[in-house]
Amino acid sequence: VSARRGVVAAASKRDDQPEDWQLKYLYDGGCTVCNSLVKLLKSKKGHEKIWFEDIADPKYAAEKNAGITFEEAMETIHVIKAKDEEVLMGMEALTALYDITGMGWLFKLAKLPMLSGAAEIAYKMVSKNRKSMGDAADGLLALGRINMEERGEGSCTDLEGECREPKPPVDEE
């Protein structure tokens, strides 16, 4: 379901704004799953058309992102289209990201009934053991994210949950 949520501030170009961006992906920089998707997208041709906006950054401002608050962005994946400031959410947002990077085929593959159950199991296993599995886990996490969104389970609202990056150890001297 698309919704026009407000006007994206376009008065002045920001330092981190890519040239000719078409989609702005609001992601949680503290989430392993979100970071895996960012890493996967950035590795593909077409990623330069995506503006990656970290909602966990203290400088994140809803008024510069179609009025989408941090809490709203945590509920499901959000993408803002540059052309008309239309906000895409959930499966529609993922479809846009995968299509712009030429991975629409992966999206279709992950939705096949035979693979969706396996992708969900792999996603749960990989998300808990991602650090020890290395970069090969990123693709599996992306497939699992597709299936979560399709079922409406794309939320990452638990700020201490398994999708969060572990905090670095504090050096107490």
Image (tube, rainbow, N blue to C red):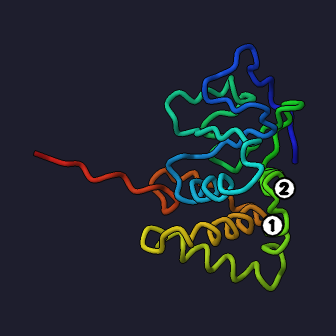
Q: Is residue 21 above or below residue 117?
A: above
Residue carrying label 1:
107
State which tag comes first along the sequence, 2 or 1. Answer: 2
Q: Amino acid at mark 2?
A: Asp
Q: Decide: marks 2, 1 in contact (CB < 8 A)?
A: yes
Name the disc covering residue 17, or none. none
Q: Which residue lies most toward the bottom here?
A: 114
Within the image, what quadrant is residue 11 found in? top right
Point out residue 20 in the picture as x, y percentages from the top left corner.
Answer: 79, 32
Residue located 52% across and 58% down the image = 32
Q: Amino acid at mark 1?
A: Phe
Could you classify mark 2 by the number of other residues whose Cα lies within 10 Å: few (under 14), some (14-19), or many (20 or more)? some
Residue carrying label 2:
99
- Residue 164 located left or right of residue 141: left
Could you classify mark 1 by the number of other residues whose Cα lies within 10 Å: few (under 14), some (14-19), or many (20 or more)? some
Q: Report helix, strand or loop for mark 1.
A: helix
- For the C terminus, the image quarter is top left
Within the image, what quadrant is residue 165 found in? bottom left
Give whichever of 159, 59 is nearer the camera. 59
- Residue 143 located left or right of residue 173: right
Residue located 67% across and 70% down the image = 144
Q: Is residue 152 above or below residue 100?
A: below
Give whichever of 19, 68 is nearer the camera. 19
Name the front one of labels 2 and 1: 2
Q: Which residue lies most toward the front here?
A: 45
Residue located 63% across and 72% down the image = 140
Point out residue 26 in the picture as x, y percentages from the top left corner.
Answer: 67, 42
- Residue 50 located left or right of residue 58: right
- In space, the residues marked 2 and 1 are separated at their CA atoms by 9 Å
Point out residue 47 in the picture as x, y percentages from the top left corner.
Answer: 72, 48
Q: Report helix, strand or loop for mark 2.
A: helix
